[in-house]
Structure formats: structure tokens, C-alpha cells
Image: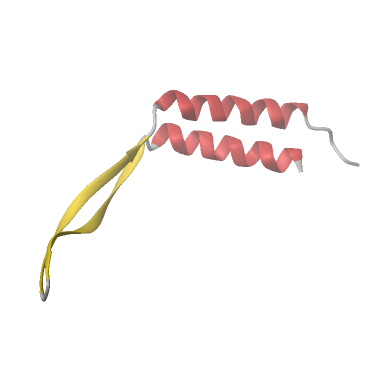
Amino acid sequence: MNRTLGIVLIVVGIAMLIWTGFSYTKKEKIVDAGPIQISADKEKSVNWPPYAGGIILIAGVIVFATSKNKK
């Protein structure tokens, strides 16, 4: 279990170092007056600092290295 968690953390950490965020489009209502509705597409972005990926990567390496082998 710990080895699997370590591998997952390593993969997520590397992915977070490569991609520092993503953006998506969301429809928002601007005017809603009875039968008349006006909406606009707003671009939202989700970003995280690069050091977060580094911390997760290091945590994954530590978990992977300290896990015991089952034989």
C-alpha cells in the first residue's frame, strides 16, 4: 500500500512540476430579466505554485523509499 501511494505521489508531483495549472471556460448569466437571458463565457484558471509539485514529489520519494518490501 505504501509503495503504491509513493508511486502515485511521485507521478502527481512530476505532473504538477510540468503543468503549473489549467484553464477552463464557464458560462455565466449576466442578465436574467424574465424571458430575456444574456450569458457570457468567462475563462477561469486554476494555478498552483511550482514548489507544491516539488514537495509532493519529495514526499512520494520518501514514502516509496521507507516502505517495506513484502516477500
Q: Identify the residue at image location x=40%, y=35%.
A: 18
Q: Quadrant of the N terminus?
A: top right
Vertical arrangement, residue 65 with respect to residue 21, above or below: above
Q: x, y percentage for residue 38?
A: 10, 65
Q: In which quadrant of the rendered view does residue 8 lie?
A: top right
Q: Nearer the viewer, residue 71 or 25?
A: 25
In this view, which residue lies farthest toward the bottom?
35
Q: x, y percentage for residue 36?
A: 8, 72
Q: How many marks?
A: 0
69 vs 13, left or right, is right
In this view, which residue lies farthest toward the front?
34
Q: x, y percentage for residue 5?
A: 68, 40
41 vs 46, left or right, is left
69 vs 32, left or right, is right
Q: Nearer the viewer, residue 56 or 39?
A: 39
Q: In which quadrant of the rendered view does residue 39 lie?
A: bottom left
Q: Identify the residue at image location x=68%, y=25%.
A: 62
Q: Quadrant of the C terminus?
A: top right
Q: Identify the residue at image location x=67%, y=36%.
A: 6
In this view, which residue lies farthest toward the right?
71
Vertical arrangement, residue 65 with respect to residue 42, above or below: above
Vertical arrangement, residue 52 with respect to residue 44, above or below: above
Q: x, y percentage for residue 23?
A: 29, 46
For the rendered model, the colour scheme is secondary structure
Q: Identify the residue at image location x=54%, y=24%.
A: 55
